[in-house]
Amino acid sequence: MEAKAQLSRRKQRILIIELLYQQEMGMHPELPDIPFVKEAMTTIETTQEAIDQTIEDALVGYTLKRLSMVDRAILRLAVFELRNTQTPSEIILDEALHLTHIYTDLGDKKAVAFNNKVLDSILKRLQPSA
């Protein structure tokens, strides 16, 4: 069994999404002793209002509450990473879309296309104009 401290970044992202989902369900999950996971969870919790507003501003014809809890978790994690890490935005978006494909897409790629559009809009808003 793989030690939690040696989880790949993708597996850490999956764990964060699971923890965010549990929180949204009203649970109080214990955070594992993994620096990236702890930092992400703490930052997302303390800045969730701003993160949610960033997502809400990028939605057209939708509200954040209308999205599935898993999609909200994926988008919140992506916004956290875009704002707080040195990870290239292309990797962050690719990972978010990969997770969308695994967890919320029904095979028609609509969820992936939707999240891609939202993330593209968020990225444009967060990046300074060149």
Image: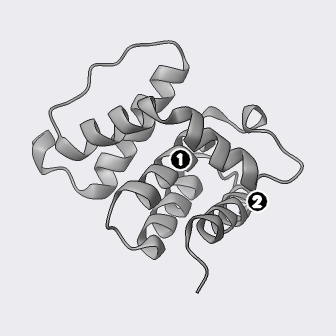
Decide which of tag 2 and tag 1 comes sooner along the chain: 1
The colour style of the image is one colour
Q: Residue at x 38, y 14 (%)?
A: 28
Q: Amino acid at mark 1?
A: Ile
Q: Residue at x 11, y 44 (%)?
A: 5
Q: Amino acid at mark 2?
A: Lys
Residue at the extreme front = 129
Whether residue 70 is visible to the viewer of this picture, yes or no, is: no
Q: Secondary structure at mark 2?
A: helix
Q: Nearer the viewer, mark 2 or mark 1?
A: 1
Give the vertical position of 14 relative to 32 (above or below).
below
Q: Residues within 10 Å of mark 1 (few under 14, many from 20)?
A: many
Residue at the extreme right = 61
Q: Which mark is residue 110?
A: 2
Residue at the extreme bottom = 130
Give left or right: position of 84 versus 75.
left
Q: CA distance from mark 2 to mark 1?
A: 15 Å
In this view, the residue in front, 104 or 56, is 56
Q: Which mark is residue 124?
A: none
Give the vertical position of 118 relative to 15 (above or below).
below
Where, by quadrant of the figure, is residue 65 drawn?
A: top right
Q: Residue at x 47, y 21 (%)?
A: 23
Residue at numbered disc 1:
74
Residue 104, how many percent across, how many down? Answer: 63, 47
Residue 54, how many percent across, how many down? Answer: 64, 49
In this view, the residue in front, 106 or 95, is 95
Residue 98, how many percent across, how many down? Answer: 51, 62
Give the vertical position of 104 relative to 66 (above or below).
below
Quarter of the picture holding the N terminus = top left
Quarter of the picture holding the C terminus = bottom right
Whether residue 30 is visible to the viewer of this picture, yes or no, is: yes
Give the vertical position of 83 relative to 43 (above or below).
below
